[in-house]
Amino acid sequence: MQVKNESNRELACWVAIDGFKKKFRLPQFTTSQWITVYDKRYNYQNFSTWCDYIERYPEYRQYNRG
């Protein structure tokens, strides 16, 4: 899965599957790297995603770009 930011503001994001969360920040007008799982039991319906403006979550500035 990939997350796409079509806004002109940086986002704080996470992608979760089966209790594992990958947190990252996503600059404006970019797409994240592919986030994959190798277990065939999972598909796109098993992923959860969340993004919001990074100004509201400054602790996300310490995470790598997605």
Image (spheres, rainbow, N blue to C red):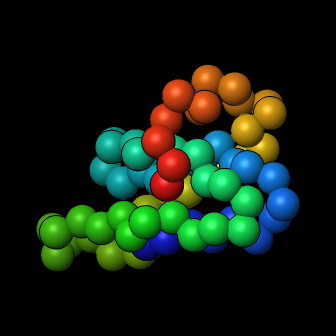
Residue 50: x percent and y percent? 62, 51
Q: Position of residue 24 (x, y in %)?
A: 51, 45
Picture quarter with the N terminus: bottom left
Depicted 59 relative to depicted 28: above or below: above
Figure check: 34 above or below 55: below
Tell me if 10 is positioned left or right of 64 in this view. Answer: right
**What residue sits 33% from the left and 75% below the top?**
43
Q: Residue at x 33, y 42 (%)?
A: 19
Q: Is residue 62 left or right of residue 56?
A: left
Q: Residue furthest top?
A: 59
Q: Position of residue 2 (x, y in %)?
A: 49, 71
Residue 44, picture quadrant: bottom left
Whether 49 is drawn above or below 1: the answer is above
Query: Is residue 30 in view?
Result: yes
**Residue 42 sits in quarter:** bottom left
Rendered position, 59 above or below 66: above
Q: Is residue 49 left or right of residue 22?
A: right
Q: Is residue 14 visible?
A: no
Residue under the image location 64 percent in, 43 percent down: 12
Label count reads 0
Q: Position of residue 53 (x, y in %)?
A: 78, 44
Q: Relative to 37, is 7 on the left or the right?
A: right
Please report the residue visible at 81 percent of the width from the left and 64 percent of the height from the top. 7
User: What residue occupies the far right of the structure in this picture?
Assistant: 8
